[in-house]
Amino acid sequence: MRPRRAAWLTTLADRAGSMRAALFGVAGVIFVLGGISLALLKEEDHGGTVQPGPSIREFIPYIGKVMREDVRFRHFVITRLFFDLSTLALPFYILLGTDVLKQNSSTLVGDSILMTTLGNVSMSLFNGWLSSKFGSRAVIRGMSLFKIGMPAAALFCVATGNVAGIHAAFFMLGAINGAFTPGFFDWLITHA
């Protein structure tokens, strides 16, 4: 009975390793394609010189005035700040996996890269569609659900001892990062 279990576990581990390698390969191809397309971008000629922007001494009082007077922009900045701070959770999820679930840290770091990339790519496509159909607020609200889901997934993995919750949290973190352009940038363009 024991040799069968060991063989089954070994086969399962080999499949998981193959899946990680495949996801890493897909992420690498996407990264290379993104780099190539970025390198091939051509900037339009404006036909004149660009006027220099204000100095930092002029800009800081101006942005302070805007933050005090424009309630919608202030709300936008605070919301964006909280979304940006969610990326700080990644090392804590890795520590949770290594300390509580006794997973290998190098495996979790690789999984975090794969799952955040997968979440970012897949949800960027969805968020672009969502933004075009329902507006940027729908994207921001939808990603807020993922912000709630990340700690819930972590609690799930602590309660069950299953590492799938950490993988789900990594995916959600990538999805949140994929919401920045169709959510916040579109909102800023629409309301600025």
Image (cartoon, grey):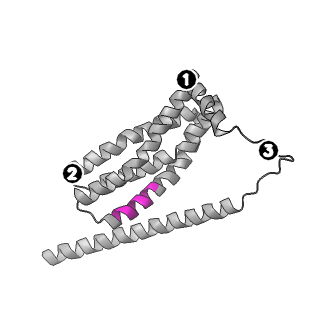
Disc 2 crowd rating (10 Å Cα; few below 14, some 14-19, many 20+) is few
Q: Secondary structure at mark 1?
A: helix
The residue depicted at 29 percent of the width and 66 percent of the height is: 104
Disc 1 crowd rating (10 Å Cα; few below 14, some 14-19, many 20+) is few
* Residue underneath mark 3: 50
Picture disc at residue 68: 1
Q: For the residue marked with disc 1, what is the amino acid?
A: Arg
* Residue underneath mark 2: 160
Is 62 in front, or is 71?
62
**Quadrant in which the N terminus appears:** bottom left
Who comes first in sequence, dot 1 or dot 2?
1
Nearer the camera: disc 1 or disc 2? 1
- Residue 71 on image: x %, y %: 54, 23
Please identify the dominant SS of the magenta region: helix
- Residue 124 visible: yes
- The residues colored magenta run 107-116
Was residue 15 drawn as part of the magenta stretch in this picture? no
**Quadrant in which the C terminus appears:** top right
Q: Secondary structure at mark 2?
A: helix
- Residue 87 higher or lower than 58, as above or below: below
